[in-house]
Amino acid sequence: MSKSSFQAQLAFDAQHIWHPYSAMDSKLPVYHVESANGVRMRLSDGRELIDGMSSWWCTLHGYNHPRLNQAISEQLGNMAHVMFGGLTHEPAVRLVEKLVDLTPEGLESVFIADSGSVAVEVAMKMAIQYWNAKGKPAKQRFATLRNGYHGDTMGAMSVCDPVTGMHSLFNSVLAQQFFVSAPPAGFAADCNDQDMQPLQILLEQNHSQIAALILEPVVQGAGGMRFYSPDYLMRARTLCDHYQVLLIADEIATGFGRTGKLFACEHAAICPDIMCVGKSLTGGYLSLAATLTTRAVSDTIDAGNPGVFMHGPTFMGNPLACAAANASIELLIDSNWHQRVMHIEQLLKHWLTPCNELPQVAEVRCLGAIGVIEMKQAVDMATIVPSFVEAGIWVRPFGKLVYLMPAYIINDEDLAQLCQRLTAIVAQLPV
Ligand SMILES: *Cc1c(COP(=O)(O)O)cnc(C)c1O
C-alpha cells in the first residue's frame, strides 16, 4: 500500500469509524496495520511491532498460521456458509465433538454462537428456560461478582460490573441483577467461610428469584484483570447446588489454556451447569463462540414450554469459522501447550516482577500466559501507546492496568524484548 493511501485511510477512519470504546472525534492514535505474521504486526509505515495482546486473548498460535490458513481455504472451496436451521455439516459436528470431549465432563449439549456476548445471552436464556420448565418461572434474575465482564449486549451488560459497565447510563433497559463483592484478590489467596458470606447470604435471601450465578472462573478479565482462588470457585459451586441456582462459567477469556489449565474451571475441578467459550476458539481468525450445557439442562428445556430453545442466529455454525476452530484446537492439543504456558508464566514472572519495586507500580501478578502490572494511577493512553509503538511493541493498557497475554508460540527472545521494552517505559512514567 502506498504511503499516501494509508494516510488517507487513517484520515477517513478518524472521520467516520468507531473503534472499541472510542469517541468519534477521538484524539487517541490509531495505527494502520498492513499485515501480521507470527507474533509480529507490520504497520503500513513500515514499523514492526511485537504483539503482547494476542488481539485480546485470541491469537494463540500467532498470526498468519499456515495450518489455520489452509483449513479456511479448504473449507472455502466446499462452502463458505449455509444456514443451520435444518442443515448440518462436518465442520460444526467435528467442532462440537471436540468441545464435548475437552470441556469438563457432563457438558454435552452445545449451542454454537457467533460472538462471546451472544454466547452469554444464550447461557442466560438457557438458565431462564430451564427454571421455567421446572415450574419455577420466578427464577429470571442472575447473581454475579463485582469486577466482572461478560460482554456488551444488553443481557450480558446487566451482569457486568455496574460501575465500570456504566449501568447508570442504561438504567431503565438493563435487567436489575444481584451483585456480590469480588472474591479476595490472589490466585493463592486463602478463602474461608467469611469470604463466601456475601454470596451465601445473597443466595439464601434471593434464590427463589435467581436462575444462575454467572462468573469468570479464576481470572476476571476486562473488569480488572484480577485473579482469585480456585477454592472460591469450588465453594461457589457448592453454594449454587445448595440453593438450587445454576452455575454459568464464562470461559470466553480463560478458555484454551490461557491460565495454565485447558479451562480455568479445572483449577477447582468443578463442572459448571453452563459454560461459554469464545475469543481464542478460532485461534483469532473469525468470530465464533459456543455455549455448552448438561444433558439435564437441555432435556429440561426440551420438556418445557415451548419445547425448544429460543435462539437461532443467522450465521449460526458458520462453516468457515468452525473449520478455523477445528484447526486451532487441533494445533493446540497437538502442541506442548501446557509446558509452553507454564514456561511463559515463569518468564513473565522473571521479567515483570522487578516492577514491584517501582514507585509507580501497585502490584505485579502473573498467571499462565497472563502478566499484569497494576499501576497506582491510570495511565495516559495518548502518550503511553505511542511510546510502546515507538519501542516496537503492541501493548494496549486500560485504566491502571498494563498487561501482556502473548501468543503461546512466542519465543524466549521476543518475550524478553517485549517485557524489557514494556518495563523500561513503565519505569519512566510520572510517579
Ligand atoms: C470478551 C469477553 C466477552 C464478550 O465477547 P465478545 O466476543 O467481545 O462479544 C464475554 N465474556 C468475557 C469473559 C470476555 O472476556
Image (tube, grey):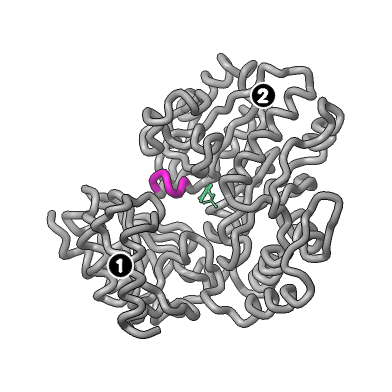
Residue ID at (22%, 70%): 424
Left/right placement of residue 425 relative to residue 182 reads left
Write down the residue under mark 1: 11
Q: Amino acid at mark 2?
A: His
Left/right placement of residue 362 relative to residue 226 reads left
- The answer to whether one can see residue 363 in this image is no
Residue 21 x %, y %: 38, 49
Which residue occupies the foreground of this view, 431 or 399? 399
Residue 301, by quadrant, is top right
Task: Decide whether the magenta segment is chiefly helix, strand or loop.
Answer: loop
Write down the residue under mark 2: 242
Which residue occupies the foreground of this view, 32 or 97? 32
Any mark on residue 92, and which? none
Residue 149 x %, y %: 47, 42
Residue 284, by quadrant, is bottom right
- The answer to whether one can see residue 136 in this image is yes
- Specify the segment rendered in magenta: 220-224
